Image (cartoon, helix red, strand yellow):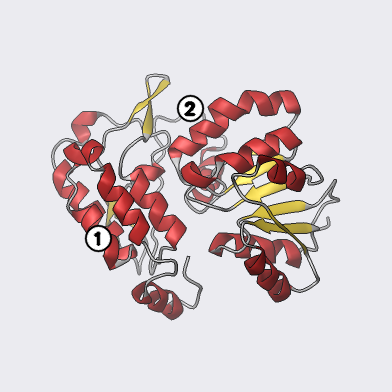
Amino acid sequence: MPSTPAQGGPIAVYGATGYTGRLVSAELRRRGADIVLAGRNRAKLEILAEDLGGEPAIRAASLDDEKALRDLLEPCAAVIACAGPFHRHGEPVLAAAVDARAHYVDTTGEQPFMRTVFEEYGPRAERAGVALVTAMGFDYVPGDLIAELTADGMGPLDELVLAYAVSDFGATRGTALSALDMLAGGDVEWRDGELVPASQSVGRGTWDFPEPVGRQRMVQPVEDVPVEDVDDDERDGDRDEHDDEARAQLAEMLDESCLFAVAETPREQRHRARSRWCRARARVPEEPSPTAAAAAQRAGRPCR
């Protein structure tokens, strides 16, 4: 079986010059796919095209230019959207994909944007014969696949718990901005057959991983709570301690310039702290911090 099936048109990668976009673009080129490198900055796209080789097509299209986005996607079979945070930058590409009848994939980890994809654009996409595949990123895909393989043939399950062990993680600007915004709330849980606002608890006890990782205290970030159905009584005991630890762990992956927004915002005051989030977002660096970059270098990989 060929590694790349026949294409009905090129695949556009929007946000191609970001960290995730570069990885996606390089893999598509490796597989011989016909791609279009797309984003807002033509100069950066030209540098990326030169790095990838093979003279891939490039198209600059601003997110506030609906016509340019439609013109970009109309000849394309699909678009892979990699430009986040998605609640701020994602919807124009999503809307253009549906209008242009191009299949859509994104790499978001943001629950509110996932709901926008399903609830606001799902019916339109179905009428247009377009597939919308959201949250195809590190946050969800490995867990979804493992859960499916594990549960296959087991019948109805009461609970299936997934735990990730991640080391030397370094956040890019997009990831840091998404994390800060998700701390402001808006996440949901699946309870009694419907989506309801989630509690702001992030602690999930401990987990025994195989060695050399061993037992670890687990943190459940608010952006990674799609369908948990946990009794509130299980959360109330040491919620504040878990919340403080979650903020501390998030702070370690963010630049020091925005630590105050994580450490000094009590849960009950989040709805009154939007100005702090805005200031923190503006101060997140364009490039990974030296600490994050050094950690990534030690691990032998680029900083995410």
Location of the N terminus (image quadrant): bottom right
The image position of residue 230, as x and y in percent, is 30, 32
Q: Which of 166 and 221 is in front in this view?
A: 221
Give the residue at mark 2. 156
| Residue at image coords 72%, 52% | 12
From where the camera sits, is residue 163 visible? no
Q: Residue 224 carries which label?
A: none
The image position of residue 5, as x and y in percent, is 82, 52
Give the residue at mark 1. 259
Q: Is mark 2 on a helix, strand or loop?
A: loop
Q: Is residue 140 above or below residue 229?
A: below
State which tag comes first along the sequence, 1 or 2: 2
Q: Is residue 145 above or below residue 293?
A: above
Left or right: 71 in relation to 124: right
| Residue at image coords 26%, 38% | 200
The image position of residue 50, as x and y in percent, is 72, 74
Q: Residues within 10 Å of mark 1 (few under 14, many from 20)?
A: some
Q: How far apart are marks 1 and 2 (CA)?
A: 43 Å
Q: Which amino acid does label 1 sit on?
A: Leu
Q: Is residue 27 above or below residue 79?
A: below
The image position of residue 299, as x and y in percent, is 44, 76
| Residue at image coords 64%, 23% | 123
Front disc: 1 or 2? 1
Q: How crowded is mark 2: few (under 14 residues within 10 Å), some or many (20 or more)?
A: few
Q: Which of 245 and 147 is in front in this view?
A: 245
Left or right: 108 in relation to 216: right
Q: Which amino acid does label 2 sit on?
A: Pro
Left or right: 301 in relation to 242: right
Left or right: 56 in relation to 60: right
Q: Is residue 83 above or below residue 100?
A: below
| Residue at image coords 30%, 41% | 184
